[in-house]
Amino acid sequence: MQLILDFPTIGEPHYAQAAPADIIRNNGQLKFFKLDDNKHPFVTKGEKESKVVRNGNRIDVYMTCIRSHFAPDNIEGIKLGDEVYFHITNLEQDWDVPHGFAIKGANNAELLIMPGETATLKWTPDRIGISPFYCTDFCSALHQEMQGYIRVSPAGSSVPLTFSVGTNLPPATK
């Protein structure tokens, strides 16, 4: 058999070029965001710190996001007329993984949460039922899985305020 072409081709434009790391590192090209640098008053620095707190009709949701889920991802016990503050910390630390956050049917805009940062969205539910929330910024192959649900009960309801982070769910019944 005759050899027609032998790779790699000399001068192929996709070949990488080398440069000393000091040229890149010392010119501000490091794009890694440390969570310890986040001084937001409502920062949540890990999923184990995720929580939902009621103070009268104010609900504070301390949430994290990381490819490819939110924590907490299911919230119950929010009542019609409550003021809900979602304080969402993006646990990603690499510069190119922002996450978005929106609630279906909300009358306000979405959030774009940059790596290592915390952002807050205020939401006042205006209907009873299930309201899904989801990531609005394509973040990974599992982006479609990055979602959760809020169950809104009538004002004056006795439904307790509960949440799950995917690990504290009750066992399934047969």
Image (spheres, rainbow, N blue to C red):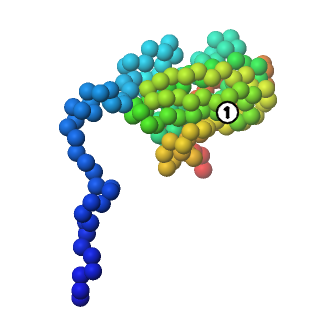
Residue 26: where, in percent of width, then height? 26, 27
**In the drawing, does residue 102 fall left or right of residue 36?**
right
Position above or below: 45 against 103 = above
The structure residue drawn at horizontal position 67% and vertical position 37%, both measured from the top left corner, is: 132
Residue 103: where, in percent of width, then height? 67, 33
Secondary structure at numbered mark 1: strand
Q: Quadrant of residue 8?
A: bottom left
Q: Quadrant of residue 169?
A: top right
The structure residue drawn at horizontal position 60% and vertical position 28%, both measured from the top left corner, is: 111
Residue 10: where, in percent of width, then height? 24, 63
At label 1, which amino acid type do we have? Ile
For the residue carrying disc 1, how many other residues have a C-alpha within 10 Å: few (<14), some (14-19), or many (20+)?
A: many
Depth check: give the residue in front, 42 or 51: 42
Q: Quadrant of the N terminus?
A: bottom left
Depth check: give the residue in front, 3 or 10: 10
Residue 29: where, in percent of width, then height? 33, 31
Instruction: Please indicate, yes or no, whether residue 74 appears anywhere in the rendered image.
Output: no
Q: Name the residue carrying label 1.
A: 103
Q: Quadrant of residue 39?
A: top left
The structure residue drawn at horizontal position 40% and vertical position 31%, both measured from the top left corner, is: 93
Q: Residue furthest bottom?
A: 1
Position above or below: 65 against 83 = below
**In the drawing, does residue 139 fall left or right of residue 109?**
left
Q: Residue furthest front?
A: 11
